[in-house]
């Protein structure tokens, strides 16, 4: 009896250890909510709890991509052949976004989503607008409310993070906009912006025109008439759905490689048709946009998206040959 008890205890310890190993292995490949990864990316900022529903989506998506034997990477952009090696994924407006690392196919998938008559059209627009109204559109927790110190103005300029400010935005365009909207424009730094860059912004545009980086941007967006933003910001989606006139201030070079270019490009150029476009394209599995709060059968949507995109990928097998030799094969 004692031997059986000891055996049971030993087996229980081994099983628990194996489960921990499996969990840790799985966790290491899930970067969207990995604390170590997040510390390196966003420092002491904490993601909004509204994004928590995406953890199960990331887990399922990684498992399904692994079954296809395809690589995947969180929150990156690069350009591979049409017979691509890697899916990128990230969050976009509290949703999960899949994309192949090929600009041609990224554009095609959004066009295919618009012309998709197979998927039931859902009310994505109302869901996204409600995110702004109930305060869940912010990616990060603990947004500050300094509304009395910074009363609303008619125009808002939304900047990307420090790693993109010097490479993705046009300073001449910013100066032009600031001059045009003199005294009636706020520059909103991204929450991930260094003190050095904020100081430079204040030197260029005046201290009273630069909002604190941790202030609630969506309060000012709701009060504004127009919003200046970029092809790498989800603020273009929210602003356009709120009926604000949006204009870009990106650098033109390589603009098509931006994280959300294929979506935002349409938003900037078709502002009369935003809600219809969002409802129809986001509802389609071909968009690669997944949200358990809207998509009741989100797992099926992932399955169909991957099958669709892998089929598109297969068309280009051996069409283009990458002459670069991998480092481990030299």
Image (cartoon, grey):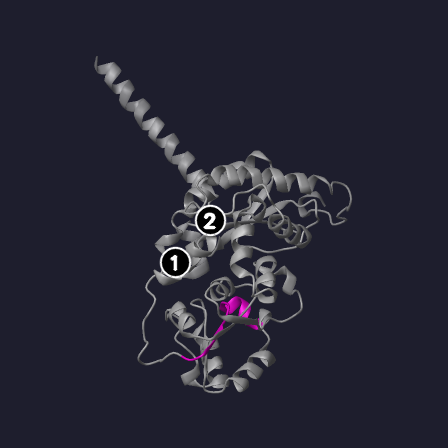
Q: Earlier in the sequence, mark 2 or mark 1?
A: 2
Secondary structure under badge 1?
helix
Question: Which of 34 and 125 lies nearest the eye of the viewer?
Answer: 125
Mark 2 lies on a secondary structure that is loop
Tell me whether the residue at label 2 lies in contact with that at label 1, contact meaning CB atoms closer than 8 angstroms: no
Q: Residue at x 55, y 44 (%)?
A: 285
The residue stretch that appears in magenta = 153-166
The question of residue 208 being in magenta is answered with no
Crowd tier of the residue under label 2, counting other residues whose Cα lies within 10 Å: few below 14, some 14–19, many 20 or above: some
Q: Quadrant of the C terminus?
A: top right
- Left or right of 307? Residue 182 is left
Quarter of the view holding residue 7: top left
Residue 98, image x and y in percent? 55, 48
Label 1, on which residue?
130
Q: Residue at horizontal 49%, vertical 87%?
A: 182
Q: Which one is in front, 15 or 288?
A: 288
Q: Position of residue 149 (x, y in %)?
A: 32, 81
Nearest the viewer among 290 and 244 is 244
Please say whether residue 163 is one of the residues in the magenta stretch.
yes
Q: Position of residue 203 (x, y in %)?
A: 48, 85
Mark 2, mark 1: which one is toward the viewer? 1
- Residue to which mark 2 is pinned: 31
In the picture, the disc for residue 22 is none
Task: Please state the horizontal and vertical placement of residue 140, each as a whole percent of the image.
Answer: 38, 61
Considering only vertical position in the picture, is 86 above or below 130?
Answer: above
Question: What is the quadrant of the N terminus in the image?
Answer: top left
Which of the 4 quarters of the picture holds residue 150?
A: bottom left
Mark 1 closeness class: few <14, some 14–19, many ≥20 residues within 10 Å: few
């Amino acid at each position: 009896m004692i031997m059986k008890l000891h055996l049971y205890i030993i087996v229980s310890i081994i099983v628990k250890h194996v489960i921990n190993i499996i969990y840790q292995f799985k966790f290491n490949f899930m970067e969207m909510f990995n604390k170590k990864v997040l510390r390196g990316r966003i420092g002491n900022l904490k993601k909004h709890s509204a994004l928590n529903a995406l953890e199960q989506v990331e887990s399922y998506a990684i498992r399904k991509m692994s079954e296809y034997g395809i690589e995947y990477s969180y929150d990156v952009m690069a350009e591979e052949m049409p017979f691509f090696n890697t899916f990128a994924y990230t969050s976009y407006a509290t949703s999960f976004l899949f994309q192949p690392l090929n600009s041609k196919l990224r554009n095609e998938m959004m066009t295919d989503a618009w012309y998709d008559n197979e998927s039931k059209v859902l009310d994505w627009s109302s869901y996204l607008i409600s995110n702004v109204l109930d305060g869940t559109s912010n990616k990060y927790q603990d947004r500050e409310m300094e509304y009395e110190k910074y009363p609303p103005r008619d125009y808002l300029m939304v900047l990307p993070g420090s790693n993109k400010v010097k490479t993705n935005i046009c300073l001449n365009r910013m100066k032009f906009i600031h001059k045009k909207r003199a005294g009636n424009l706020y520059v909103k730094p991204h929450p991930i912006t260094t003190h050095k860059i904020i100081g430079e912004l204040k030197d260029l545009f005046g201290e009273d025109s630069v909002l604190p980086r941790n202030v609630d941007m969506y309060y000012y967006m709701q009060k504004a008439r127009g919003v200046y933003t970029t092809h790498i910001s989800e603020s273009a989606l929210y602003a356009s759905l709120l009926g604000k006139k949006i204009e870009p201030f990106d650098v033109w070079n390589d603009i098509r490689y931006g994280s959300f270019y294929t979506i935002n490009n349409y938003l900037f150029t078709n502002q009369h048709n935003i809600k219809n476009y969002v409802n129809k394209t986001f509802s389609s599995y071909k968009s690669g946009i997944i949200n358990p709060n809207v998509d009741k059968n989100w797992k099926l949507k992932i399955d169909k998206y991957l099958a669709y995109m892998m089929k598109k990928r297969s068309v280009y097998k051996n069409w283009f040959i990458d002459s670069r030799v991998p480092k481990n094969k030299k």
